[in-house]
Image (cartoon, rainbow, N blue to C red):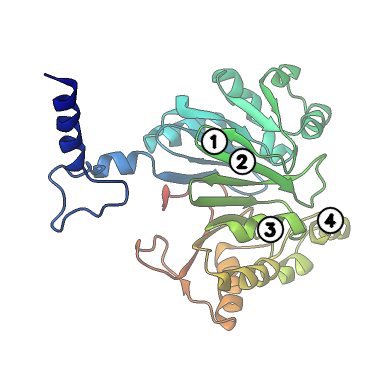
Amino acid sequence: MSRRRQKLRQQAYWSDQPGLFDLPPEGGTDSPMPELSDADSDAERLQFISFGSGSSGNCAYIGTASCGLLIDAGVNNNIVLEQLAANAIDVNTIRGILLTHDHFDHVQYAYAILRRHPHMRLYTTPKALNGLLRRHNTSRRIADYHQPIYKEFPFNVGPFTVTAFETSHDGSDNMGYCIEAGEIVFTVATDTGFITPRADYYLRKAQYVMLESDYDEYMLRTGPYGAHLKARVASSTGHMDNADTGRFLAQIAPEGRLKRVFLCHLSHINNTPEKAVGTITDILTAAGIDVCPDAMPLPLDRRLHLLPLPRSTSSPLVILS
């Protein structure tokens, strides 16, 4: 074939191909793009579960089928492993522990988990790690698993972009976390006496938040704690009460991003799940915000959902989508 005829055949071929800005013919194309099956889309859905939340121990999981993270490590590691298995979560996909601060109820089982699963890392600031080693009778070998992080410096773990931010508590160093997975944002702010400016910023970004609602003001004031402990809990470096949490949620909910709130670190002496949900619901309702009262709302329910996390048992596995 002559070069001229070959060129004409090539021109004829390419003239029949759709251009970059050509619209497809009505009725679709002969070879549509394959769609993801339900199994493929479900596999990478973001999931959340709490294994316990309160002064007796704190630990939660967030992840997909291929990558996950633990938030704190204050719950017995055997219980954590048992609940992971019960929810078909492979512990080998968990990359590490995000440590919020160095109090005992958040760090007690960190070394046990890391030693048993050496592929995991301990994500926290150097200051928080030093506080953990100074305050607790923990093996110094926990430092072998430490992955240093710094507040306001995002870091990547698999599909997640994680940013630690300042909270206000009386640990050696205190932080919340903003966890971004594509368009989904999950923000954790626990053990904080008030909403710091940086916590405010990251909580407003999120569709899903895990936010402290530690005590009822009347129950604390009239309860059995001594004056010093009452003052510590209610201070700006202590914990947030139900009304504080409700008023903050009433500020950010009208912005339209917030879908679900996991109320965490409820006191077993100075609060109840019913008291926390009731107080916050009253504040939100007064602000014109519809609240879903169901434990597990339907996927199309657009009302704001409040779920108080159990103190000493696991929560249901929740799909974040």
Q: Residue at x 52, y 69 (%)?
A: 256
Q: Quadrant of residue 309?
A: bottom right
Q: Which mark sits nearer the N-terminus, 4 or 2?
A: 2
Q: Position of residue 190 (x, y in %)?
A: 67, 51
Tell which of 162 and 216 is nearer to you.
Answer: 162
* Mark 1, other Cα within 10 Å: few <14 / some 14–19 / many ≥20: many
Q: Quadrant of residue 196?
A: bottom right
Residue 232: numbered disc = 4
Q: Do residues under tags 2 and 1 come within 8 Å of each other at their CB atoms? A: yes
Q: Which mark is residue 69?
A: 1
Q: CA distance from mark 2 to mark 1?
A: 10 Å
Q: Earlier in the sequence, mark 2 or mark 1?
A: 1
**Residue 201: image tag:** 3
Q: What is the crowding at mark 2: few (fewer than 14 residues within 10 Å), some, or many (at least 20)?
A: many
Q: Earlier in the sequence, mark 1 or mark 4?
A: 1
**Label 3: which secondary element:** helix
Determine the CA span between mark 2 and mark 3.
14 Å
Element type at mark 4: helix
What's the amino acid at mark 1?
Leu
> Disc 2 or 3, which lies upstream in sequence?
2
Q: From what the image shows, is residue 63 above or below residue 250?
A: above
Numbered label tally: 4
Residue that numbered label 2 is attached to: 162
